[in-house]
Amino acid sequence: MIDSRSLQIAILLWGSVLEATASVCMFFNRNYEKNKRKWMICMQSSTAIFLAADSVALVCSGMAGTAGYVIVKISNLIVYMCVIAVLLFFHEYLFEYLKDRKTVNYDIRRKIVYALCIAEFILVIVSQFTDLYYYVDSRNFYNRGSMYWLSTLIPAVGMLIDFFVIIQYRKMIGPRLSLAMCLYILMPLVAALVQLFFHRVHYVDFSIEAAMFFMLFASIEEQNIKMRRLLEENIKKEEQLEISTTLNRCISELVEIGDIHESIYNLLEIVNGYFNGDRSYTFDIDYDKNVINNTDEYFVEGITSQIDNLQNIPISVISEWMVNFKQNKPYYVSSLNQEKGTESYDVLDAQDIDRLLAVPLIKDDVVIGFLGVDNPRKHCDDATLLSSIQYFITETVYMKKQQENLEYLSYRDVLTGMYNRNKYMDVLDEYKERKINDAGVAFFDLNGLKVINDKKGHKAGDTYICLAAGTFIKKFPENAYRIGGDEFVIIMPDVNEAVFEREVNKLHEEMQKKGVSISMGYLWRKSVDDVVDMLNEADRLMYEAKKLYYQSNKA
């Protein structure tokens, strides 16, 4: 039979695990408002640590030796600190619901809460050197100190301040969440009073654990209610109900599928079905190159894929569309004749598009792309669904871009845009796993870079490097790597020896034409067991060439 102590430890540990899990889930819940989510995560994490620390203290109570004393002492310190943290985080979480309301003013109460937390923090620290709040006896058991009641009173005052704020502004917060917040305060307070007289059971811990879950569920429900209200505002008749249903399906696809392209593909399929169109798609706008690119598409049977044909399209083709997009308005083509005299006419005509509906994808007030449907046969001029989706798909597209940027930066040299040492090492690892044939490698080192840096400055040196890098990118875009300040490498498998030597020598010639002096060493082998050995040999040949360069320049 499980004794009372073991049962309490089990409940505390389970509570800690559940709170930690809830914290992780909340972290990945991007639909929740950022600051509210942040403070909820902080509360959940603090509660998880608090419960875990108290369970450790229980487990180690009575453990003989110095280790037992230290563990019990530190565990209880963490418990007291987490109580302060939970109070502060709850206070900030509550403030998030009221900070934007002009009628709300409780600055003095906020300052009092912070003062109480600071006071509690100081007293907890003092307790580590005195018996003020608690002490650990010779048997390594936790015992209350003479002023233990103060450790309950101070947080209680702070939470009561928040309690009356909740009561005062309950209509602003919402009935369900207000109730949950009140329970979050009252349950631990009642438990603390009970524990003052019956301290063998961790009533406070259990009450905080339970209250935290009430808060979590109420917060999620509050967010769900908020989202449902936003949807309900757009629902008027049966058509709008269909919009709502379709929108939910679209959002689900974005949330549930891990692969972004698969998510967007499924969403586009749903969108296309709603409009009964030929093709639905997303476009990305590249302002650096002034082009648009088709990034994802869905098309029905009998319709030809267009994604490969719609790359690097001049942005001027959609200049008329952009007028609407910049105002966050849809663009509707009711008939192809509408586009006569514009650059878009030929592009649409080539795809047999007679009607079109598109909405902008906007991030931070910048149009980053658009979502469209070709030849819609239903809801032709109603962009409600697309406009509702655009926020969610924009966030997804933005996330995809961030991932692509991170991947690019991890493998690209910031200065030159060439593949960097990280990419170079990955390629070497790849070639270690398999044998390659007909491979050529080359090692290069810029001559005179130090002199340029010393005489003309590092900016001139960077220009010199970029001049060389441009030639590498032009001749060997996927096979050249900048592995150091002035060091470059080429690794090219599956290449004819004569072709490889010709291209390397052409590269050297182009460098000379541009005024870039470079030493190189290269070799080709029919069968390669160890690329590193080849590179070492190429490096040796390069240094011989570099030695000759400096000898000739001295002469």
Image (spheres, rainbow, N blue to C red):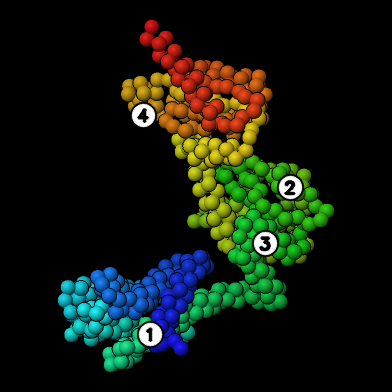
Real-space CA distance between mark 3 and mark 2, rounded to the nearest whole angstrom: 18 Å
Looking at this rendering, what residue extends furthest in the top direction? 555
Query: For the residue marked with disc 4, what is the amino acid?
Result: His
Q: Give the number of the mark in front: 3 or 2.
A: 3
Q: How many marks?
A: 4
- Corner quadrant of residue 309: top right
Direction from residue 406 to residue 325 in the image, left or right: right
* Label 3 packing within 10 angstroms: few (<14), some (14-19), many (20+): many
Residue under pointer 1: 5
* Label 1 packing within 10 angstroms: few (<14), some (14-19), many (20+): some
Indicate the position of residue 229 as horizontal and vertical percent values.
Answer: 56, 77
Q: Is residue 192 above or below residue 479?
A: below
Q: Give the number of the mark in front: 3 or 1.
A: 1
* Label 2 packing within 10 angstroms: few (<14), some (14-19), many (20+): some
Relative to the observer, which residue lies in front, 15 or 527? 527
Indicate the position of residue 328 as horizontal and vertical percent values.
Answer: 57, 58
**Which residue is drawn at the image coordinates 72% and 55% (left, top)?**
298
Looking at this rendering, what residue extends furthest in the left direction? 130
Real-space CA distance between mark 3 and mark 1, rounded to the nearest whole angstrom: 53 Å
Query: For the residue marked with disc 3, what is the amino acid?
Result: Leu
Residue under pointer 4: 458
Q: Is residue 474 above or below residue 87?
A: above
As helix, strand or loop, the secondary structure at mark 4 comes to helix
Residue under pointer 2: 306
Query: For the residue marked with disc 2, what is the amino acid?
Result: Gln
Query: For the residue marked with disc 1, what is the amino acid?
Result: Arg
Q: Earlier in the sequence, mark 4 or mark 2?
A: 2
Indicate the position of residue 447 as horizontal and vertical percent values.
Answer: 43, 20
Residue under pointer 3: 267
Is residue 245 in sight in this rendering?
yes
